[in-house]
Amino acid sequence: MARAVDAAGISLWVWNVDSDDIQMDERGYAMWDVPAQTALTFEHLSEKIHPTDRDRVRSAYVATRAVIGPYEIDFRTLLDEEVRWISARGRGSDEDIQRRTMTGVFLDVTGRKQAEESSELLAGEMSHRVKNLLSVASGLARITSRTSAGVEDMAQQLTRRLTALGRAHDLVRPLPGNQGSAALLGDIFAVLLDPYDDKGAFAGRIRIAVPRMGVGQNAAASLALIVHELATNSLKYGSLSVEEGVLDVSGVLAGDAVRITWTEQGGPEVIPAETQGYGSKLVRQALEGQLGGSISYEWAKSGATVLVEINADRLAN
């Protein structure tokens, strides 16, 4: 029996219901971080219980003598600022009690609780991300339908926008050096602008030089939409619409902001529209709402220059 208890990693305890004395085996004293053979009562052990769980455990402890049959309660301990999970298991009721003592076991379930918390966090995060993507997809479909010439044009535009979102999420991955789960800023621009090199004449005409920094999961989708809209406009009206045009994307860190300059040269002269299109509204909304930034345009005969400023902390989230 002793070998079975040791193999299971459990601690045995006995509690005298009259004197309130608690005795444990060696593993129990180590689990509670108290010297072996120390005279203990529940009040002594309760000092080791996490303050958030203390009242709940105290109520359960008092109720055990009225419980008929087995009981189990999980709670946290706080030992030198380290949080551990313990499962207390026993059999309630004073019926057939032997020598006025009740018996039970303690089991360290920290690993299981941490795994459960990680699973719950992952499930919640996945649910949140799916809801966000569905909301974004719905908004894109609504906006695209208003700016499309026909069903085929709408399908092509919507597919490109959704593909841009997918590419941004594919880039989200763990970075070395405990930088968190993120994509590199330069990778987002490179991957999202790469399809425009498939046009043959555009190959090698896009230059990217931005700070090496991470883009968090929440910011990746918003930034992808912005890059895609700017590239689409350039392909329709700007430097990427002609063989001689080039695009230069550069960025710098300025205090708590990232400043990105999107410079087009060699394209046709662009005359700004009198009213803001839905794509421009989408870009501005993503920048001001999700990324805490701003956008401005400078129109010149040599090509358009777009100045984008993004809050660095928002970009990392």
Image (cartoon, rainbow, N blue to C red):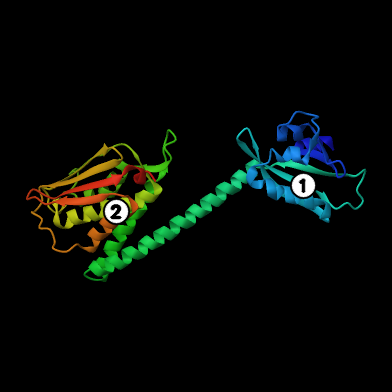
Dividing the picture into quadrants, the one containing residue 212 is top left
Residue in the foreground of this view, choosing between 279 and 205: 279
Residue at point 30%, 58% (across, down): 161
Check disc 1: other Cα within 10 Å, few if <14, some if 14-19, many if 20+: some
Residue 107 placement, left or right of 194: right
Position above or below: 144 against 164: below
**Residue underneath mark 2:** 288
Coordinates of residue 288 in the picture (x, y in percent):
29, 53
| Foreground tag (2 vs 1) | 2
Residue 9 shows up from this direction: no
Label 2 or label 1, whichever comes before in sequence order = 1
Coordinates of residue 216 in the picture (x, y in percent):
39, 45
Residue 193 shows up from this direction: yes
Residue in the foreground of this view, choosing between 104 and 279: 104
Is the N terminus in the top left, top right, bottom left or bottom right quadrant? top right
**Residue underneath mark 1:** 89
Coordinates of residue 99 in the picture (x, y in percent):
93, 43
Task: Give the amino acid at mark 2.
Answer: Glu
Residue in the foreground of this view, choosing between 309 and 172: 309
SS at mark 2 in the image? helix
Q: How many numbered circles are shown?
A: 2
Q: Could you give the CA–CA distance between mark 2 and mark 1, rounded to whole angstroms?
A: 54 Å
Check disc 2: other Cα within 10 Å, few if <14, some if 14-19, many if 20+: some
Judged from this view, the residue extending furthest toward the bottom is 150
Dividing the picture into quadrants, the one containing residue 49 is top right
Coordinates of residue 147 in the picture (x, y in percent):
23, 67
Residue at point 76%, 35% (across, down): 28
